[in-house]
Image (cartoon, grey):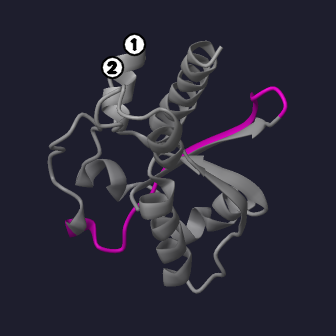
Amino acid sequence: MVEFGAVVLYPRRLIEIVCYSTLIRPEDLSAVAVASGRSDGITREVVSSAPKFEQVADRIFGILNGRVWGGHNMQRFDCARIREAFTDIGWPCPESVGIIDSLAVLMHGFGRRAGNLKMATLASYFGLGQQKHRSLNDVCMNLEALKYSATVLLLVNH
């Protein structure tokens, strides 16, 4: 894990109450590319001065524990990275009270009307701009994609 980003929402109105993002310096800096091959701008130099996971683990645990977690491909990707990061430092993993995986939700309810359902494709389909492949940007884009797809489904089904 080289970056963590989360937004905590007040559930009844989807109002942001906490926003947190940090780069994370991995134990092995050679695992991070010297030059970024994607548009994220995350390079070895950028993460070399970031805090190690154990320095931000308490904050991340507080954000995640006892909450509903949401993300795109969350169950296959993010949940595993979170478990690994906490296991690596000998901490218990935060517990979710539920998971909203927008990829699973969209595959089931939205179908392939937006193409392959990758976040970049959804962003293009809904006119949300280009995916930046940065944690906090992806969190916000994911939330918007869910809102737009819910609106489309409500309009189509009525």
Residue at left offset 64%, top offset 19%: 154
Is residue 132 visible to us here? no
Which part of the image, by quadrant, shows the N terminus? bottom left
Q: Nearer the viewer, residue 44 or 103?
A: 103
Query: Which structural element holds mark 2?
Result: helix
Q: Which residues are magenta?
A: 12-30
Where residue 74 appears, as percent x and y from the top left, is 50, 55
List the residue tagged with mark 1. Answer: 127
Give above or below for 95 relative to 45.
below
Q: Nearer the viewer, residue 116 or 78?
A: 116
Q: How many circles with numbers are drawn on the protein?
A: 2
Q: Nearer the viewer, residue 42 or 94?
A: 94
Q: Quadrant of residue 118?
A: top left
Relative to residue 50, is residue 68 drawn left or right?
right
Relative to residue 20, is residue 138 drawn left or right?
left
Amino acid type at circle 2 is Ser
| Cβ atoms at labels 1 and 2 below 8 Å apart | yes
Indicate which disc residue 95 carries.
Answer: none
Indicate which disc residue 124 carries.
Answer: 2
